[in-house]
Amino acid sequence: MKVRIVKCPQCNADVPWTPASKWRPFCSERCKLIDLGAWASERYRVSVAEDGEPAPPGEAKLPGS
Ligand SMILES: [Zn+2]
């Protein structure tokens, strides 16, 4: 039975896709936490920016079309 190898999204290490790889697709708990932390802080920044600025007018309907 072939074991599928995936790349850790955080550090690009080879991770065997098996039940033994408990943090897959990450190679370790550390990489998983780093990635989740980065994602969470990114989302936080984006949501703050959305709250602070009005939507760009590009989506508005053009008059007369
Ligand atoms: Zn890793």
Image (cartoon, rainbow, N blue to C red):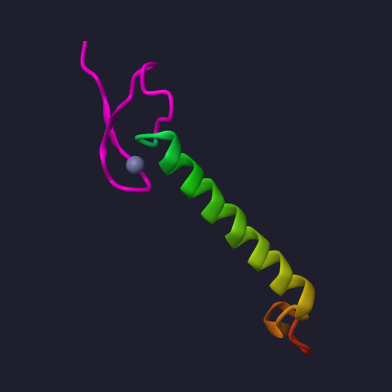
Picture quadrant of residue 44: bottom right
**4 in magenta:** yes
Measuring from the top left, give residue 18's x and y in whole percent: 34, 19
Residue in view at x 65 percent, y 67 percent: 46
Most extreme residue toward the top, as rendered?
A: 1
Residue drawn at x 55%, y 51% as measured from the top left: 37
Q: Please, is residue 48 above or below residue 11 in the view? A: below
Q: Position of residue 16 (x, y in %)?
A: 28, 26
| Magenta highlight on residue 65 | no
Q: Quadrant of the N terminus?
A: top left
The residue at 70%/82% (across/down) is: 56
Ligand 1 lies in which image quarter?
Answer: top left
How many numbered tags mark residues here?
Answer: 0
Which residue appears farthest toward the left when viewing the image? Answer: 2
Relative placement, left or right, of 6 versus 32 is left
Relative image position of residue 49 (x, y in whole percent): 70, 74
Q: Is residue 36 above or below residue 49?
A: above
Left or right, 63 with reference to 40:
right
Q: As rendered, which of 25 and 22 lies closer to the eye?
A: 22
Q: Is residue 31 left or right of residue 36?
A: left
Location of the C terminus by quadrant is bottom right
Tell me if 2 is positioned left or right of 7 in this view. left
Part of the protein shown in magenta: 1-25
Taken as a whole, is the magenta stretch helix, strand or loop? loop
Residue at screen point 64% across, 67% down: 45
Name above or below for residue 15 compared with residue 33.
Answer: above
**Outermost residue to the bottom:** 64
